[in-house]
Amino acid sequence: MVFQQPNPFATSIYNNVAFGLRLNGFKGDKAEKVERALRGAALWDEVKDKLQAPGPSLSGGQQQRLCIARAIATEPEVLLMDEPCSALDPIATRRIEELMLELRERFTIAIVTHNLQQAQRVADYTGFLYVDTSEGGRTGYLVEFDESRRIFEEPTHQHTKSYIRGEFS
């Protein structure tokens, strides 16, 4: 899981990435797995000479990529990402989005985002959840799920249509 705010552990870059490996009792070459995960998170070239530096000493975008490296080091079936770019500047956001496009070749990624443009750029499929604010209304129920192109170009549910048009009624 990769959270909204980068949450590197107060330990070295290396130990941040190796954490899940140790937790799961990995017996192989940890250094090779750490390097592979950092490469997979597009961070290796920036940190290869300072693996013992504290994870929190990195920039915000680097910290988020470090958290992604930590998450993919154990090669999970599914990578969950909760607003992974909301705390980042536009340049770091672009790097994370490019990374998501690369990682989706190896992992199933489920991302939560309020950024419609981001969903259009990175998601193959989109689910639109709605919060009914009327008295007794329901919270966070799925009103539409389809290929992203269809959701954004031809939504079928009125709530989805209104939200995409910017009509937040």
Image (spheres, rainbow, N blue to C red):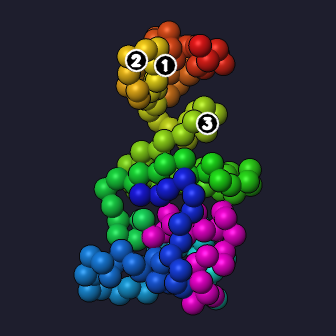
Task: Decide if residue 20 is on the left or right side of residue 83.
Answer: left
Q: Which residue, given by chain and number where applicable, does mark 1 sit on?
A: 133
Residue 51 in magenta stretch: yes
Say which residue appears at 58% left-offset and 78% top-offset.
55
In the image, residue 63 above or below residue 96: below
Please report whichever mark, 3 or 2, sits nearer to the chain's N-terminal start: 3
Toward the front, the furthest residue is 135
In the image, residue 164 above or below residue 61: above
Residue 68 in magenta stretch: yes
Q: Which residue, given by chain and number where applicable, does mark 3 sit on?
A: 115
Mark 1 neighbour class, 10 Å CA radius: few under 14, some 14 to 19, many 20 or more:
few
Nearer to the camera, 30 or 161: 161
Q: Which residue, given by chain and number where applicable, does mark 2 sit on?
A: 137
> What amino acid type is highlighted by mark number 1?
Thr
Say which residue appears at 61% left-offset and 76% top-offset.
56
Q: Nearer the viewer, mark 3 or mark 2?
A: 2
- Span colored in magenta: 50-70
Tell me the distance, in whole angstroms, between the alpha carbons under discs 3 and 2. Answer: 24 Å
Pinpoint residue 77: horizontal percent, then vertical percent.
31, 56
Q: Choose top left, top right, bottom left or bottom right for residue 110.
A: top left
Badge 3 marks a residue whose secondary structure is: loop
> What amino acid type is highlighted by mark number 2?
Gly
Tell me the distance, in whole angstroms, between the alpha carbons under discs 3 and 1. Answer: 21 Å
Q: Choose top left, top right, bottom left or bottom right for residue 125.
A: top left
Badge 2 marks a residue whose secondary structure is: loop
Nearer to the camera, 120 or 129: 129
Pinpoint residue 140: horizontal percent, then vertical percent.
41, 29
Badge 1 marks a residue whose secondary structure is: loop
CB contact under 8 Å: marks 3 and 2: no
Mark 2 neighbour class, 10 Å CA radius: few under 14, some 14 to 19, many 20 or more:
few
Nearer to the camera, 16 or 51: 16
